[in-house]
Every structure is written in structure tokens, then in C-alpha cells.
Image: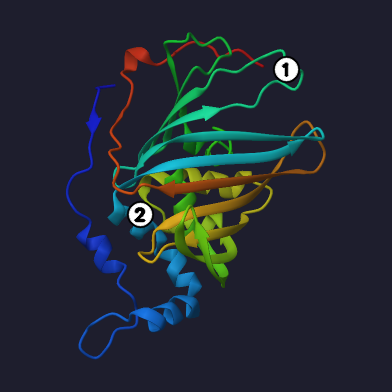
Amino acid sequence: MRERQHRRTGTAAALAAAAVGLAVCGTGCSPTGAAAEDARAADPVESLHRAAAGLARAGSSRARTSMEMATGGTRVTIRGEGVYDFRDRLGRLRVLLPQDPTGSEEHRPITELLAPGALYMKNRGAGVPADKWVRVDTAGLSDGNLVTGGATDPSAAVELLRGTRDATYVGTAEVAGTAVRHYRGTADLALAAKGASEGNRGPLRAAAKGFATALVPFDAYLDDEGRVRKVRHRFSFVNDTHEGTVAVASTVLLYDFGVPADVRLPDEDDIFAGRIAER
């Protein structure tokens, strides 16, 4: 693979135009103050459908992720932190795995590169040399990499909101010192896949088939510019080793919009081509 340096360039004028509010005054101006707040509260589904466009206008941000699941009577939390470019849909996360329950094994952080249709992991373990990357086709994963990588791709997390079937406006709140509007609802993975960008369409379509249900409950927090500051999804999937389903709560927190988010994908020679050991 030829090495590429991705930088945020250009503008998102078309996306900005699409995100203009539906209610305008007779002279073409947008509602402000209480009127704007009333409009957002009156149509939460439309506000959530437009959330991805708000992040494209922002260009990039820092991101923190958290994934919680209960398995074998133990609650496990995987945390990640990094940057994301919402225009090129490229990200870099440093993912921290939980300590072994016995305390005998300490996992090294995994570096993950997120790209349209692909996940790259370094320090993967399982027989992979420390200087090599593992590439995974996310459209080939039963969960579309919403869970597998231990961190939900921020772009996919937000585009899932395009599949919002129903939602309610809960009220105002605060996320990391920023005033936000809190929405609660349910998204349909299959519907989200139809409206998603090309890179997320395949993974979301796979997740719609692979999860126990295509319906995903969520809480989303948008700022006054329509940007997602925080989104929390609750996924359910069938565990092959245990009866019933496993519930996973995935949270993505976005902040420092406009921060440099240059992401370089690995050369083909740096990608591991051998067999990954079974754990």
C-alpha cells in the first residue's frame, strides 16, 4: 500500500447547506434563542439525522472511547483515546485493555488506525510481531467493528444516528463543560446503512445482520452547532460460548474540534500476512 499523508483540506459547503434548519423567517434568516431551541426539541429525529453533517463541518476532533461489557460475571471496560478526521473518516486511537483478572498479565496498549472499511491494529499480540500491523476488513466482521476493536469508530457511531427511528428530547445537559441538548432514542442499523457514507455502509449492513437485534438504543448529546459531543449506544450480540445475548455499552466522547488529525496508514510491507494465533 502506498503511504499517504491525509490532511484536512477544503470546506464542506454542501454539507453545511444541507444542515440548515427547516424553520426560517420570511427574510431567510434562521431562528435563534428560544425559537431555535423549540425547533430542535420539536423534531429530535431530524436533528439526529443531521448530526453527521455537523461533524463534517467541524473537520476533526479529539476522541475518547469506552466500551463496557459483562461476561462470565465480570464487568470489563476497554478505554481508548486519540484523534479523528471526520472529512476523510480516518482516526488513530490508543486502546487500553483491562488487566488480566488474575493480575498476572499486563496488556500493552494497542494502536488502532480507523479507515473507511478497514481497521489496522499494532501490538495486537497473538503471534503478530510487535513491529507489524494487522489489517481487518470491517465489512467482513459480523458486528461491523462496532465492538470487535474494543472501540467504536467515531464516524460509524455518529452515522448510526442516521438510522434513528424514534427519539425524544430529554432536555439540556452539560458534557465536559459544554452546554448540550440530550436526546434519547432507538436507531435501526439497516436504515443507518442505507443513508451512511460509502465507507460505513458495508460495516453497518454487516452489523444489522450480525447483532441479536438491528435496533440500537442510544443517548446522544449535541451542542448548539449540531455537533455530537457524546453518544452512547447499547448493542446486543449472541455469545457463542454462553447462552443468551451479551450487552455492550459503547460511549464516544468528542472534544477539541479542529485539532490537527493527520493519520498515516501503514505500508503494505508493514502489514502482517501470517497466521494469527488462537487465544
Point out the tag, 1 or 2, that comes first from the N-terminus: 2
Residue 191 in view (yes/no)? no
Task: Write the residue at 42% across / 13% down.
Answer: 132
Q: Position of residue 53 (x, y in %)?
A: 34, 59
Q: Position of residue 85 (x, y in %)?
A: 32, 42
Task: Name the foreground residue: 113 vs 33.
Answer: 33
Task: Write the residue at 43% across / 78% down.
Answer: 37
Which of the 4 quarters of the picture holds residue 25?
bottom left
Q: Which residue is mark 2?
A: 55
Residue 140 in view (yes/no)? yes
Task: Write the residue at 39% across / 57% down.
Answer: 52
- Image quadrant containing the C terminus: top right
Which of the 4 quarters of the picture holds residue 5?
top left
Q: Which residue is mark 1?
A: 103
Which callout, 1 or 2, points to the residue nearer the camera?
1
Is 257 placed left or right of 175 in the picture?
left
Element type where label 2 sits in the image:
helix
Question: How far apart, in angstroms, are the residues tagged by discs 1 and 2?
Answer: 40 Å
Q: Is residue 223 above or below residue 248?
A: below
Could you tell me the amino acid type at mark 1? Gly
Task: Write the residue at 48% across / 41% down.
Answer: 64
Task: Name the foreground residue: 260 vs 138.
Answer: 260
Is 68 placed left or right of 109 in the picture?
right
Could you tell me the amino acid type at mark 2? Leu
